[in-house]
Every structure is written in structure tokens, then in C-alpha cells.
Amino acid sequence: MNTEGRNDVLEAFVAEPLHNESTLSRYVQRYPDHATDLIELAFLVGNLVESDDPITEHDENRIESAWAQMRYMAEAASNEALKQLTQHAAKVARNTGLPPQVITMTRERIIEPASLTRSFLRRVGEAADVSPDVLRAALSGPPLATARSFSSQVIPKAPQQVPLRQILEDAHVAETFIDELLKDE
């Protein structure tokens, strides 16, 4: 599996001088995890026509519709990734060697998105059968409000996001394993 980031791959494709079938084929073979995005991008780039004409209301509607579809697809993929983490939490913990509370904090988005490394995302993604890019997108939102029962008179506060290192240290993960997980190839 190639670990190059989605945006890097798509930017490299756009920078190519030709966006023909052989270029697309080469990129899809080299980056199979990004095949769908590459095909969609090739279609969009192939339909671009330079024009000095102003954008019409119809054009704006088509653009907004395409963005809405992309947002919907990204949200659906994120929801599926979180569902996988929820349904298979024990298996993911077992297969990654991580304590269950780390998987729980991951799926509840307690980990600061900026601290998520490729190594961690790849390990958890493989165990949950989710691509690292989709997993990163799914975990990039605010912490999820979990439905818990409280008998206190104090209203619970929204959870705060915490760096991955702190989550791992608090879960008593071995320092060598932490170093391996924080390695951002």
C-alpha cells in the first residue's frame, strides 16, 4: 500500500502536462487507494474549458451541486469509518496491540486531529478495514458527544481533544510502541 497522502497524489496528477488515459492508468496503478478520486479528478480536468465568459447561474448551481455531492460522499465515508471502529472495537484493539480505551478515544474523536500520524492511522485503519485517508477525515471533526447517564447535579462538560502521545501515555502504552506509532514516515 502506498502511503502518500491523497492531496499530494491529486496535486501531482493535476500538475501532469497531459491528463490522458495513459497518465490516469499510471496513477491508478501506482496509487490504487486513490483510484476513485483520480478518476473523478480526471473527468473534471477533462471537462475544463478555458473561457473568458462570466460564470452563469447555471454554472454556479452545477458547482454547488458537485460540492454538495462531494461533502455527502465524504460524510458517508466518515460515518462508515466510525461505524467500523464502533462495531469492531475489540478486534481493532486486539489487532493493533492498543488498549481498548485508546480505540474508544479514537472513535469519539478525543485525539487532536493534528497529532494523528500516518503510522497510527495505517495501523488502526488496517485493523478496522478503513483506508488511512478516510480514517483521518472521519477523525478530523469535533469530539463526539456520547450518550452517558450521569447522576450528578453538575452538568457534564464537552470533552476536550488531547494529543495522541498523551492518550497513549495515559493508557500506559510502552514507550517503544509509542515511538513507533508517532513515527510519521
Image: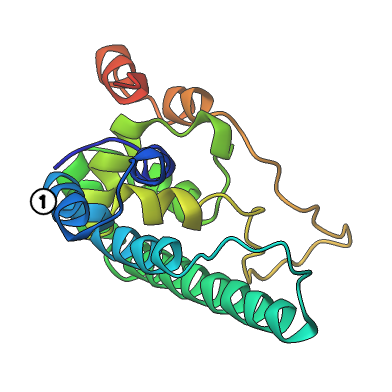
Q: Nearer the viewer, residue 38 or 162?
A: 38
Residue at 30% over, 48% down: 18
Callout 1, which amino acid? Gln
32 vs 172, left or right, is left
Report whether 179 appears left or right of 149.
Answer: left
Of residues 26 and 96, the one drawn nearer to the viewer in this rendering: 26
Residue toward you, 37 or 49:
49
| Residue 175: percent from left, percent from top | 32, 13
Question: Where is the N terminus found, in terms of image quarters?
Answer: top left
**SS class of the residue under badge 1?**
helix
Quadrant for the C terminus in the image? top left
Percent x, y for residue 174? 29, 18
Q: Residue at x 73, y 77 (%)?
A: 60
| Residue 138, image x, y percentages | 48, 58
Question: From the viewer's perspective, is residue 138 above or below residue 183?
Answer: below
Q: Quadrant of residue 162?
A: top right
Residue beneath the point at 70% across and 48% down: 159
The residue labelled by disc 1 is 29
Q: Residue at x 38, y 24 (%)?
A: 172
Q: Is residue 127 visible?
A: no
Can residue 16 be seen from the camera position used here? yes
